[in-house]
Amino acid sequence: MTKSFVNEWLEVIRPLFLTDAIIELKGEEYDGSVVDTNRIEPFEGGDVIFEIRWKLENNQNRPNKRSRSIRIIIEEEAIDDCVDFKIAGLKLKEIIKIKLSTFNPDDGPPTEEWKISTDDLT
């Protein structure tokens, strides 16, 4: 299986988040540059997981307070069943866009998980 689809998906979803948002891919930080997929290991079996957070900048007493994390889990089966990674990436973007519209980065549990299944990407 090709690993390049993850870079494509990161580029598609990146504009949905603040410029200084930190995106981690299975522990590897994504700073807006292309991920070195040779160093990342979740694609030979297993889910692809993006963890995203950013500085809130809404509290003068806590200027470095971070948002709640969003953990996007793209299930292994969804990846295995994917026929067109470009179209799946666009569907992923729409799902995230909808979920972000109701996400409160400042209130709730520390991490919110969004699972992405085969039905979501096909």
Image: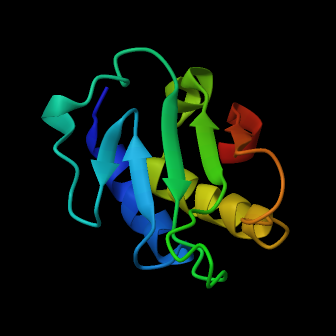
Up-down: is 104 above or below 42?
A: below
Between 120 and 57, the one nearer to me in the picture: 57
Q: Looking at the picture, how far across and down is residue 28, in whole percent?
A: 30, 40
Q: Quadrant of the N terminus?
A: top left
Of residue 28 and residue 61, the one placed in the foreground of this image is: 61
Say if 49 sits above or below 52 in the image: above
Instruction: Judge left or right: residue 32 versus residue 22.
Output: left
Give me the residue at 56% from left, 51% from top. 88
Colour scheme of this structure image?
rainbow
55 or 31, which is in the foreground? 55
In this view, 99 is above or below 59:
above
Residue at the far top in the pictured view:
45
Res 122 visible? no
| Residue occupying the point 53% across, 77% down | 63
> What is the x, y in percent for residue 68?
67, 55
Q: Residue at x 71, y 34 (%)?
A: 117
For the C terminus, the image quarter is top right
Report if residue 94 is visible in the image.
yes
